[in-house]
Image: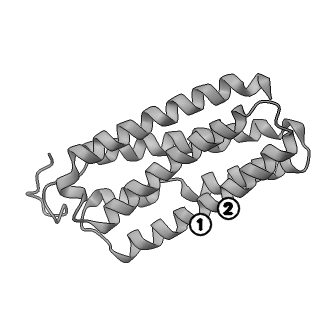
């Protein structure tokens, strides 16, 4: 696994930095996010994606860890991540917001695909497919890309109007 230490370092650094970006984006727009349970849950989903990548990086960086052990850990992480993301998605859907960004976040947050691809990667490693670690690149890239997109939307696309379909609404 030593050859994967650079991958783990890059992913860990990127996800930790992006967690900071998300906190900044949410903090700047807290007056519009806080009242909306849907937006709060969508922000938590984004945080979960970045957190998942951070945990993947930590697990990948464990020195001397057998491939099968890493696979079992990643499989468990995928199951835990999927469960958490499903709960957050249900909470968000139960309290639909009138913000146009809410629908975009629902469509763009890659919660299902990250969970499934992380599970597949973990399963490959758990079953001893040594090159299964290359499959780990897919959920990491998707989680980072989806998370960055969500953070950007939180920062730039929340409107001050409660009904963005109103032609006279203004964005801030």
The secondary element bearing badge 2 is classed as helix
Q: Position of residue 83 (x, y in %)?
A: 59, 66
The crowd level at tag 2 (other Cα within 10 Å; few <14, some 14-19, many 20+) is some
The residue furthest front is: 63
Q: Is residue 43 left or right of residue 7?
A: left
Q: Nearer the viewer, residue 116 or 29?
A: 29
Q: Position of residue 33 (x, y in %)?
A: 25, 57
The colour mode here is one colour
Q: Position of residue 40 (x, y in %)?
A: 33, 60
In the image, which disc is placed on residue 159?
none
The crowd level at tag 1 (other Cα within 10 Å; few <14, some 14-19, many 20+) is few
Which residue is labeled 2 in the image?
Answer: 79
User: Relative to 140, is 88 above or below?
Assistant: below
Which residue is labeled 1 in the image?
Answer: 83
User: Relative to 117, is 97 above or below?
Assistant: below
Q: Quadrant of the C terminus?
A: top left
- Give the quadrant of residue 138: top right
The secondary element bearing badge 1 is classed as helix
Q: Residue at x 82, y 31 (%)?
A: 64
Q: Quadrant of the N terminus?
A: top right
Q: Nearer the viewer, residue 112 or 20?
A: 20
Task: State yes or no: discs 1 and 2 in contact (Cβ < 8 Å).
Answer: yes
Q: Nearer the viewer, residue 51 or 157?
A: 51
Q: Residue at x 83, y 46 (%)?
A: 69
User: Relative to 149, is 78 above or below?
Assistant: below
User: Relative to 86, is 130 above or below?
Assistant: above
The residue furthest bottom is: 94
- Give the quadrant of residue 99: bottom left
Q: Residue at x 61, y 43 (%)?
A: 55
- Give the quadrant of residue 135: top right
Q: Is residue 156 left or right of residue 118?
A: left
The residue furthest right is: 128
């Amino acid at each position: 696994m030593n050859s994967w230490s650079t991958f783990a370092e890059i992913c860990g650094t990127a996800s930790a930095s992006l967690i900071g970006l998300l906190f900044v984006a949410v903090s700047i727009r807290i007056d519009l996010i806080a009242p909306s349970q849907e937006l709060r849950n969508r922000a938590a989903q984004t945080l979960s994606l970045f957190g998942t990548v951070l945990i993947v990086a930590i697990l990948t960086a464990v020195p001397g860890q057998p491939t099968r052990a890493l696979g079992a850990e990643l499989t468990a992480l995928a199951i835990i991540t999927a469960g958490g993301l499903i709960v957050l998605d249900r909470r968000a859907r139960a309290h639909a917001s009138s913000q146009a960004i809410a629908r975009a976040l629902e469509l763009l947050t890659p919660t299902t695909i990250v969970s499934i691809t992380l599970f597949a990667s973990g399963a490959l490693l758990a079953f001893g497919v040594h090159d299964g670690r290359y499959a780990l690149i897919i959920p990491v890239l998707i989680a980072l890309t989806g998370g960055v997109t969500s953070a950007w939307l939180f920062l730039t696309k929340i409107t001050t109007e409660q009904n963005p379909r109103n032609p006279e609404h203004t964005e801030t």
